[in-house]
Amino acid sequence: MTDRFPTTARGLKKMQEELKHLQSVERPKISAEIEVARAHGDLRENAEYHAAKEKQGHIEGRILNLNAWIGRAEVIDVASFKGTKKVLVGASVKLMDCENEKEVAYRIVGEFEADLKKRWISVNSPVARGLIGKAIGDVATIQSPGGNREYEVLSVDFEDAE
């Protein structure tokens, strides 16, 4: 489980900020909640205590995961890719769906940064895996649950990546 995973500097910062928040705000808050619930008496039938302990377990698990991810993160210097016309982590890409001729746009980011609302897709997603290494004009075949889809790479941009 020592595999490195790519992320942008923004993604690493986001993980570090969440870790700091969990350790300095959420952990002390849940400890206080446990103490208050403990003061209510019999712990065997104390729903507040059990809920707080469960929440504490989730927080501690998230802290462990974040520490592991931060330790394995390989920060990609996206700025060094400017001018590159191949799809790499950090690229904003415009694609043409060859079947219906509709344009779609994505940014390929580290797993932790993925956000479908922003159209930021994980480097580990099927679409990103099919696009990595492709250049403008190339056609990528992407395996999807509905069958293979083909996308032509229209543009690759690193200008607003960081």
Image (cartoon, rainbow, N blue to C red):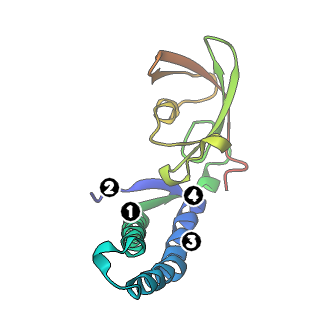
Residue type at mark 2? Asp
Residue highlighted by disc 4: 77
Mark 2 or 4 closer to N-term? Answer: 2
Rendered image quadrant of residue 96: top right
Mark 4 or 3 closer to N-term? Answer: 3
- Image quadrant in which the C terminus is located: bottom right
Residue type at mark 1? Arg
Residue highlighted by disc 1: 72
- Whole-number angstrom distance, CA of label 3 to CA of label 2: 22 Å
Residue highlighted by disc 2: 3
x, y (%) of residue 141?
A: 49, 20
x, y (%) of residue 66?
A: 43, 66
- Whole-number angstrom distance, CA of label 4 to CA of label 3: 20 Å
- 113 shown above or below 23: above
- 145 shown above or below 58: above
Mark 3 or 2 closer to N-term? Answer: 2
- Whole-number angstrom distance, CA of label 2 to CA of label 4: 19 Å
Q: Residue furthest top?
A: 99
| Residue at the image point whose x is 57% and y is 67% from the top | 13
How packed mark 2 is, by other alpha carbons closer than 10 Å (few <14, some 14-19, many 20 or more), is: few
Mark 4 or 1 closer to N-term? Answer: 1
Going by the image, does 1 lie left or right of 139?
A: left
Query: Does dot 3 land on a helix, a strand or a loop?
Result: helix
